[in-house]
Amino acid sequence: MKLKSLEISGFKSFADKTIIEFMPGMTGIVGPNGSGKSNIIEAIRWVMGEQSAKDLRGTKMSDIIFGGTNKRSALNRSEVSMTFDNSDHYIKSEFNEIRITRKLYRSGESTYQINGVDSRLRDIHELFMDTGLGRESFSIISQGRVEGIFNAKSEERRGIIEEVAGVYKYKQNKERAQKELKQTGDNLARVADIIYEIQ
Ligand code: ATP
């Protein structure tokens, strides 16, 4: 799975439609302070379903819509699309290419699409589940978060390493299975009691 392109329109400082194509290899984005580098990363987080306006450096979600400048009036809509090459089917989907889109209007109306089909936020989350890309993943590390990881307690840091290594989901599955096993054990004990009473 590879990130192919990002299309931003009306999101923060990107008033006009801007398309960023990600070529094979590593992509670096450079620019003067305030030119919108962080806004690009935030556009990626937003299209993947970020729900916290604060984490996008705003107070309310509509703050991400282009708010105007001296030369240009504010817009009423923000739209971001991200396209993945999924020919290796790393994302569990039959499609070789996956395009997700999120739109937000100043009125508050908000939509998500997967390959042009209206979808729910939950569908977006499920799409990225187990890919290491979801909202809570460590595929995007902000400046402040680096410091947070350094200052984290050793158990917390271990959790982060487990998450990155893909061990965390197995631990969760194990815990769930152990709980079910215990519940089944309790049920069996109850059945044994009932049989004993009947006999
Ligand atoms: P630095 O190198 O200092 O970290 P940067 O290149 O990462 O900067 P960003 O933080 O991405 O820059 O962009 C900040 C710019 O985005 C500011 O000029 C700010 O005014 C503009 N901006 C943020 N939200 C909006 C919005 N809703 N409408 C218009 N412009 C916005």
Image: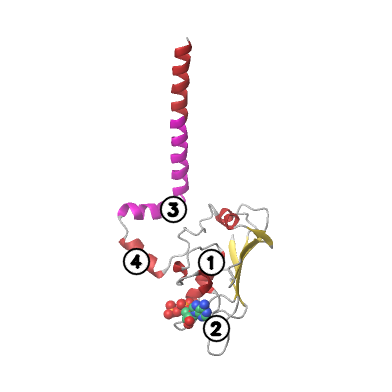
In the displayed structure image, the side of residue 154 where residue 142 appears, left or right: right
Q: In which quarter of the image is the N terminus?
A: bottom right
Judging from the image, what secondary structure is the residue with disc 4 in?
helix
The Cα–Cα distance between marks 3 and 1, rounded to whole angstroms, is: 21 Å
Instruction: State the residue position of label 3.
Output: 163
The Cα–Cα distance between marks 2 and 4, rounded to whole angstroms, is: 33 Å
In the displayed structure image, the side of residue 21 where residue 194 appears, left or right: left
Instruction: State the residue position of label 4.
Output: 147
Q: Say whether disc 2 or disc 4 marks the residue closer to the N-terminus.
A: 2
Q: Say whether disc 3 or disc 4 marks the residue closer to the N-terminus.
A: 4
Viewer-nearest of discs 1 and 2? 2
Q: Which mark is residue 46?
A: 1
Identified at 31% across, 62% down, the residue is 151
Q: Is residue 36 visible?
A: no
Q: Say whether disc 4 or disc 1 marks the residue closer to the N-terminus.
A: 1
Q: Say whether disc 1 or disc 2 marks the residue closer to the N-terminus.
A: 1
Q: Specify start and end residues of the magenta stretch as a single range.
A: 154-183
Identified at 53% across, 72% down, the residue is 62
Look at the numbered disc 1 and say if its residue's Cβ is closer than 8 Å to ligand 1. Answer: no
Q: Which amino acid does label 3 sit on?
A: Glu
Look at the numbered disc 2 and say if its residue's Cβ is closer than 8 Å to ligand 1. Answer: yes
Asked whether the residues under the numbered discs 3 and 4 touch, taking CB atoms below 8 Å apart as contact, a structural biologist would say no
The Cα–Cα distance between marks 4 and 1, rounded to whole angstroms, is: 22 Å
Instruction: State the residue position of label 2.
Output: 68
Viewer-nearest of discs 3 and 1? 1
Asked whether the residues under the numbered discs 4 and 1 touch, taking CB atoms below 8 Å apart as contact, a structural biologist would say no
